[in-house]
Amino acid sequence: MRSNITFYLDDTAKKYADKAAFVDEKKSVTFKMLRNGALNIAAELVKKGFFKKPVVVYLEKGADVITSFMGAAYSVNFYSPIDVDMPAARVNKILSVLSPEVVVTTKELMDEFAGFDYNGDYILIDDGIYDKAPDQNDINVIYDHRSNGIDTDLLYVLFTSGSTGVPKGVTINHRAVIDYMDWVTATFDITSDDSFGNQAPFYFDNSILDIYSTIKTGATCFIIPRELFSQPVLLLQYLKDNNINTIFWVPSALIVVAKLKAFRNVDLTSTIKRVLFCGEVMPNKQLNIWRSYLPDAVYANLYGPTEITDACTYYIVDREFSDEEPLPIGIEMANTDILILDDKDNLVTEPETVGELCVRGTSLSMGYYNNPEKTKDAFVQNPLNPYVPETIYRTGDLVKYNERHEIIYLSRKDFQIKHMGHRIELGEIETAVSSLEEVTLCCCLYDQNRQKIVLFLDTDLDRAYINERISKLVPEYMFPNKVVYMENMPINANGKIDRVKLKEYL
Amino acid sequence: MEEKILGIIEQINPDVLTYTGDTMMEDGTVDSFEVIDIVSALEEEFGIEIDASYVVAENFANKEAIINMMKEILG
């Protein structure tokens, strides 16, 4: 029984010492290097006395991020990555939730971080961390430290959009990731011969699959440069050149490739083995293009919010679909139970009856960090179990079974959306826009067909101006794609902005 | 032709018209979906098919780059 994810890295580093583990634009880090680097960071954390504490990782996306994550894990601390492009106001909100005492970063980025509301410690890293392992004495101290941790200690905290403007820190423990990795590697038969093409940012939990499948099996993970995702031919060429056989991307990344018909330029038939996706709805129209060019690949639709460790249901595409049909999100993963509850909390078992998807299992988050109120709302007692305490997570996603007893995603219960793979509370954008002195009323809607965030407001302001002003408050992916000026904002009977009426203007 | 192209761009993302740098794709002034929208609108307007190999950062560096790309395609 393993209490810490780093036991897997110990094994893999022994077995595949000199094999490439994580490859980014600048370097290739082998499993041995990854372990050495992680142990060096862990040694520092242990020396400084950190145990079960948040470790902020503030680095450009690359292999060093993973090394830092593992350093936190070895020392039984938990990591929380902060994107270097995140606006200062949002970073500060995260810092106020997390109250970290240590940040792993570089000398160059430290000055930037010092500009945030933070006065704690730093661990500065460079390529030197990979040169040699800490001495045996230090390693023994780390191992001692590690043996004091248990598998329900936190591994990471990832922040997601919160409707009031305060991001929520989703906590995940070691056990949940070990459980998920067992499922992923067994279901898709992942081995050291495989190589991943990572798209997901490391602050987004889709990356958990890439990171931990690699660490568990000795596969190789190529961290694809972000700018390639809008240059489809270069992107496919990158996959081919690096012999990447497995991708787990957000649908929007797959859609770009399909829409621009880039398969005609690069033949990937003997390269790509598995195409997995998660994070938003994958339209069959685009998936059918992938399937026509790469008919032998395995396609799988994964579904799940961050709160249940990346994914909780899956559907391995096993039949033809017309362009208009929805792709099922499928069935529950092993050791996970899905309850579809109707509005009276009765269990839905019949096809075509709508209910909220709720999850039970080892994969569940321990709650939102330092936020008992929000935790209480989403992590609740299983209404079907009056006998013992048992927590389920209410996703807020409305679903139904089809005739084959596969789950079909329908919509959200609230105003959360998925845009370009990012989970966004429209309320967070509205809160940011409302902070402009010119604005009295505003409302954000998502135009699903055109994949655009549309902002309605009662003041005639142009989009560039709004985006510039809110850039200090919300990340760029939350910027409205379209701004509509409404001289008279429609108001409903409750005195609230009439979203239904506004929808007609989309 | 230039006016038609600029009209299309304005419909999809007016920020491109006022953008003065030359790394529009990298710095996120246009996202990948807007690039697709621009490509499909240009294809429709000019009755052509734009090969995916044209969709690279240098051809979407700024509005002039898009115009130059179209000149090349239309010959």
Image (cartoon, coloured by chain):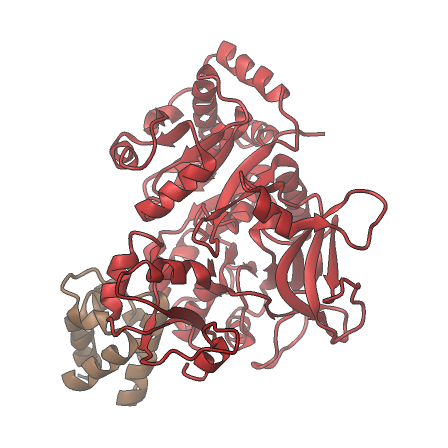
Of A435 and A235, nearer the camera is: A435
Percent of width and height locating residue A315: 66, 63
Q: Position of residue A105 (x, y in %)?
A: 34, 32
Q: A288 above or below A370? A: below
Q: Is residue A492 left or right of residue A217?
A: left
Which residue sits at x=33%, y=67%?
A440
Placement of the C terminus of chain A among the 4 image quadrants: bottom left
Q: Nearer the viewer, residue A358 or A293?
A: A358
Tell which chain the image draws in brown: B
* Residue A240 relative to residue A4: left or right: left
Q: Nearer the viewer, residue A114 or A457?
A: A457
Does the image show residue A190?
A: no
Figure check: A123 above or below A463: above
Residue B18 shows in the view: yes
Residue drawn at the location 53% of the way across and 30% of the way down: A73
Q: Position of residue A161 (x, y in %)?
A: 47, 53
Residue found at the far top of this picture? A137
Q: Outermost residue, right direction?
A: A387
Residue A502 or residue A8, whichever sits in front: A502
Q: Quadrant of the N terminus of chain A?
A: top right
Residue A85: percent from left, percent from top: 32, 48
Letter of the chain in red: A
**Count of residue discs:** 0
Give the residue displayed 31% in from the left and 83% down from the top.
B41
Q: Locate residue A276: give its quadrant.
A: bottom right
Q: Residue at x 63, y 20 (%)?
A: A147
